[in-house]
Image (cartoon, rainbow, N blue to C red):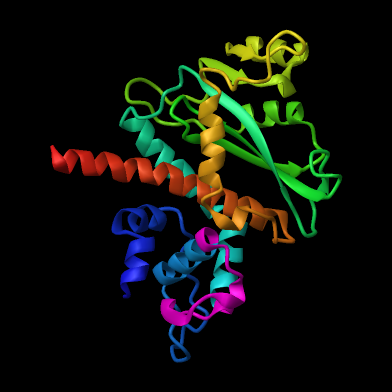
Amino acid sequence: MTDLVERLVPDELWVRFRRVVPPTEVLRPQGGGRRRAGDREALAAIIFVATSGCTWRQLPPVFGPSWQTVYRRFAQWSRARVWARLHRVVLDELGARGELDWSRCAIDSVSLRAAKGPLTGPNPTDRGKLGSKIHLITDRNGLPLSLGISAANMHDSQGLQPLVRGIPPIRSFRGPRRRRPAKLHADKGYDYDHLRRWLRKRGIRHRIARKGIESSQRLGRHRWVVERTVSWLAGCRRLHRRYERKAEHFLAFTGIAATLICHRRLVRMDGQKQSV
């Protein structure tokens, strides 16, 4: 195994990935044939494509499997929702260690250009060019809790309810699993009374900027964390522009980026423990 594979997929991430990946199907029970490419090498190649932004055909041969094999493995795992399950495993571990702060969560979205495919539309902030949008909710530390994608012309307010419902029940340091923030911060794109009523009905306090009353020059004392997370997502260069025709593949790369953000927090915590 090359050093690049071990660096992209460290042992801790590999152990968590094995908990969610579907079992391997034996296509030739009688034996023979070519040996199946390893899942760890394929996962490292997928992460390389996500972080570097290269195309599948540009994948270097150092990983072992061909780019066709890596793409087939990516498509298979995306259909099985492996990335969403891996994201939840990492969130569960963060929650069990008390690293998720539910006191103040923030919601926002980011638009990017798209080549073609479903869930694309004219971007009103980019001269009507075709694009898609990523919606996300983060905790007080900026760790992504819930993700979604839509066409670029979908209004931000329409993504609030699906995102809040999409927060999975996550383990807590003490007490039962949790899936509702104590307070939700949002900008003026979510300034609608029916959203405030919907949040109050679910016991979620809201702090939504009001149109014509509050200034647009300041991000706010608590909403800046979600803007920082958007910049973290941009570290996954595959998300600079949507090239995937299938919406599930675009959502998969978004889930991979969110998982890597959360996993870095776990690695940092482990490093602090070792130093102490």
Magenta-drawn stretch contains 254: no
**How far across and down, in percent of the image, does residue 16 sit?**
37, 52
Name the quadrant containing residue 14. bottom left
Name the residue: 40% across, 28% down.
100
- Inspect this view and state whether residue 180 appears: no
Name the residue: 60% across, 35% down.
136
Name the quadrant containing residue 69. bottom right
- Inspect this view and state whether residue 121 appears: yes
Q: Nearer the viewer, residue 113 or 118?
A: 113
Find the residue positioned furthest to the front: 217
Image quarter in which the C terminus is found: top left
**How far across and down, in percent of the image, does residue 115 sit?**
77, 59
Q: Nearer the viewer, residue 173 or 114?
A: 114
**How far across and down, in percent of the image, does residue 217 sit?**
65, 20
Is 94 situated above or below 30? above
Question: Which range is magenta?
Answer: 50-68
Is 247 situated above or below 92? below
Q: Is residue 36 left or right of residue 53?
A: left
Name the residue: 79% across, 39% down.
125
Image quarter in which the N terminus is found: bottom left
Magenta-drawn stretch contains 54: yes
